[in-house]
Image (tube, rainbow, N blue to C red):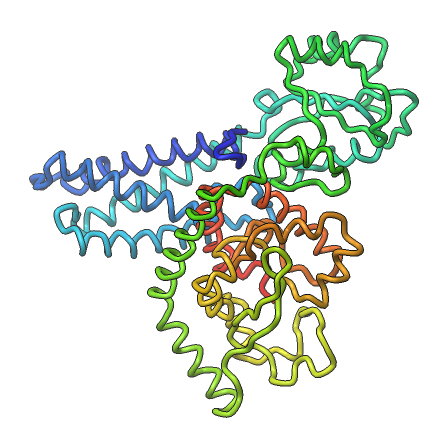
Amino acid sequence: MIRVFRHYLSSAYMWLMIVEFCVFYSAMFFGSRVRFLWDPVWYTDQTLYFASIIFSIVLLISCAGMGLYRRSLAWDDYQLLPRVCISFSAAIFVLVSIYYLLPEFQVARSVLGVVLVVAFIGFMLSRYLFYRYVSLDRILRRVLVIGCGEKANKLVALNEEYLVRGFTIVGFIPLQEDQCTVDKKYIISDKQSIYEITQQHDIDEIVIALDDRRKIMPTDDLLDCKMSGVEIMDLMSFYERERGLIYLENLFPSWLVFSDGFAQSGLRSVGKRLFDILASLLLLLVTWPVMLVTVIAIVMESGVKAPVFYKQVRVGEKNKNFNVIKFRSMTVDAEKDGAQWAQKKDSRVTRIGSFIRMCRIDELPQIFNVLNGQMSFVGPRPERPEFVEGFEKRIPYYRERHRVKPGITGWAQLCYPYGADEQDTIQKLQYDLYYVKNYSLFLDLNIMLHTIEVVLWGKGAR
């Protein structure tokens, strides 16, 4: 794993991005040579160099927007061919626009067609080789776990659903009559010292996963390992790196106090505010025709007298309430019986409302909340005060998500489906805390890029 501005990125996917950038870059040269095999070449080398760079960057960003470099993508959501087809289609649209604005870098349609075919073949070949070899045990980080209780046992299935496994667990070492819940075949005898075990099994990392933190740690052995180059990690840091969340089950105040992150400096706030304004204005410029069509559709379905927008009180930064603005997607009397969660196939949702919820169009008026400074473009989703009051009493650290402004999109929306009950709220809180702890402009850009995937795939829409 590579940490960039406190956000963890998969080193495997970083290498894949570099390889596929080279594939796309080479495709322009190879494709142009194929196109002009029998005809004289009328491109200069300089034109091809610039055209190749533009083509590679656009295609790489388009693929990233479809989640093709997201390490938390599961096999069930993968759908490689549809994602690649949408990526290439979007890239063609962007490339044509760039060529129209910058005709000096334009390539002929016949050349672009051949280049896209070459790039597609090269991309699929690189993916085949990547997924065939990246999960081989000999190239994975080898992890030794100290402890064999419930918390240690949960590590076994930590990354089984991911496309790319980040590590392999070599074994578990019990401490002081642990109540073991892991399979006995994974237990390593404690007759040897931990240092000897790490040398014998070629261990890269040791993770401390004890159910009871009061147990006496083998400090001397762990120090020997640390000084010999073996990384030592606590369970919280391990989950933060591997899953991009703050693991609530093992969270305690001292970890929050002494961990890095949670920076809210004045310069950082100014930068985020400028980013919010720029991103909101850009989105408004692109989506105003969609918003206009949505207004007309709602009026046609519900009548002129029915409201097009609705305002709802939500909890914002520092627990201050504000009115969030959305397109109305439910019937006018949807909450005559009080506040309630949205459900799957909710009968209160209108026909137009069902579509705009699936495409996240109902969220677009929140642009004005961002421009007013009540929300940020990226941040935890704002909740209703009726729900927040109960969550703060029952869920530890729930108040901490209100340390920053709520957002139109966020890390939890990207990593976890729509939450419809308190258990889902707890799961999403773990991602929200990760965002609050590790916020940076880089992470905001990363979330915005991957939100395209969320919108197109309808993930979490309800």
Q: Position of residue 157 (x, y in %)?
A: 72, 37
Quadrant occupied by the N terminus = top right
Residue at figure coordinates x 10%, y 37% from the top left: 44
Query: In the image, 91: left or right of 45?
Result: right
Judge whether 154 appears above or below 425 on screen. above
Judge whether 365 appears above or below 333 on screen. above
Quadrant occupied by the C terminus = bottom right
Judge whether 454 appears above or below 251 on screen. below
Q: Position of residue 140 (x, y in %)?
A: 60, 24
Q: Quadrant of residue 289?
A: bottom left
Query: In the image, 96: left or right of 188?
Result: left
Residue at figure coordinates x 43%, y 55% from the top left: 276
Q: Nearer the viewer, residue 201 or 405?
A: 405
Query: In the image, 44: left or right of 5?
Result: left
Q: Position of residue 269 (x, y in %)?
A: 47, 47
Query: In the image, 46: left or right of 79?
Result: left
Q: Nearer the viewer, residue 425 or 93?
A: 425
Q: Position of residue 312 (x, y in %)?
A: 60, 73
Q: Nearer the viewer, residue 385 or 35?
A: 385
Q: Nearer the viewer, residue 28 or 423?
A: 423
Residue at figure coordinates x 29%, y 57% from the top left: 93
Q: Quadrant of residue 226?
A: top right
Number of on-image labels: 0
Residue at figure coordinates x 47%, y 36% from the top left: 128
Judge whether 105 appears above or below 329 on screen. above
